Amino acid sequence: MADLNQTPKGNRIHIGIFGKRNAGKSSFINTLTKQKTALVSDVAGTTTDPVYKAMEILPLGPVMLIDTAGIDDVGELGKLRIEKTKEVMAKTDIAIILTVSGQPLSEYEERLIKGFRDLGTQFIFAINKIDEKRSSVDTLEELESRLGQKVFSISAKTGEGFDELREEITKLAPKAFEEAPLLRDLVEEGETVLFCVPIDTAAPKGRLILPQVQALRDTLDAGAIGIIAKENQIKNQLNNLVKKPKLVVTDSQVFKQANEIVPKDIKLTSFSILMARQKGHLEELVAGANAIDSLKEGDSVLIAEACTHVCQAEDIGRVKIPKWLEKHVGGKLNFEWYTGNSFPEDVGKYKLVVHCGACMINRRAMLYRQNVCKEAKVPMVNYGVAIAKLHGILDRVLSPFK
């Protein structure tokens, strides 16, 4: 159970369940997982907001199941729920589109199909509630011809058809989930990585933050040696080592100090830049850094934080980066913040989007956000890349990457 409980949300295959109200989405999850995970009711619209459930489905391993509100929800609240469902679509690795046996394909399912094809997301189309009424063979063949793929007939009530459907999910999973390395491709067995980990007011009590833990684990997976020290101990650690470390990884907030301390013949980068490479297209984020030089006083800048946390006195996204950007520009900028799962569909009013390390979202969600900015011709940069650019050390911290 350790793997199930400890695998980070952003490193799980995201499987989203979509369909109209009362299509049996919650019942589907319960039958798929063989547990009473989701609330089930005959009343349409029981699921109001996306419900995330970390589960393990063999042989896939840890997954994130997402139960969504009906795509045909009504009223003002219904519109908001549909918007939340659309947010889930952007981060879904494998989609399950459910419809009810005996009902024709509606405009709602058509929109889902088009939406996932536009996103390049693989989806499974399933007809539920065959225990109540079965679609004819001709209807199934016509639908399969129309979709260009197999249609699954299932019953979330009896479990019929689920073995075959689970097999299909397993087949799609390797294509949907490609976990890139953090740094294990940058070091060889026996080499040393020195981690610079500041402990300030923003550091969580009694633990390290997720990117630090993941980078250390990736180092161990490579058979390399990881050493951790605070920023004021880095120089001593370097002097104590008989052999120079292959790489120094620092928190981006202390890039300036680390750059001054670490000799130029030792490669230096940050946790945030490693995350940028793993979760998104690093090259595009680096290109976005050039837009910093084009910012003018009064321009609007979006800062996107994929997690929600209490703002600290020296918060990196709320205080430090805005301060550094305004110093670089020589005037005031208009900042807006989006946190958690929220990200605007229209980013056209911004001159720059500055995104966090994205450790709390999956790669598909990050690539979607990059694509939104790309289509709007709005440059996007990552925290670590932006900070390196602002401190004049971008070339150095990109040197570990070929």
Image: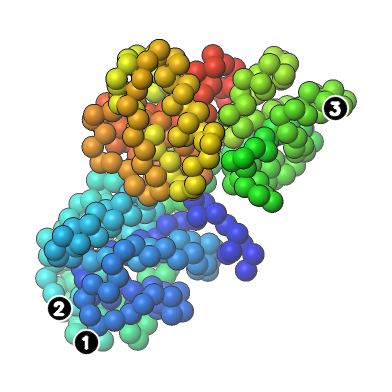
Q: Up-down: is 44 above or below 14?
A: below
Between discs 1 and 3, the one toward the N terminus: 1
Q: Is residue 355 left or right of residue 143?
A: right
Instruction: State the CA–CA distance, disc 1 to disc 2.
Output: 9 Å
Circle 1 Cα neighbour tier, 10 Å, few/some/many (<14 / 14–19 / ≥20)? few
> Do callouts 1 and 2 mark residues in contact (Cβ within 8 Å)?
yes
Q: Which mark is residue 132?
A: 1
Residue 16: image location, x then y, percent: 35, 61
Q: Residue 68: which disc?
A: none
Residue 226 picture quarter: top right
Q: Amino acid at mark 1?
A: Glu
Tell me the residue that label 3 is attached to: 241
Q: Of residues 25 and 319, which is closer to you in this image?
A: 319
Residue type, label 2: Gly
Task: Name which of mark 2 and mark 3 comes first in the sequence.
Answer: 2
Q: Which residue is mark 2?
A: 102
Looking at the rendered image, the quarter that the N terminus falls into is bottom right
**Residue 136 vs residue 189: left or right?**
left
What residue type is disc 3 on? Leu
Front residue (pair 227, 140): 227
Query: Element type at marker 1?
Result: loop
Residue 274, visible in the rendered structure: yes
Nearer to me, 347 or 147: 347
- Kindly indicate the quadrant of the structure image that contains residue 223: top right
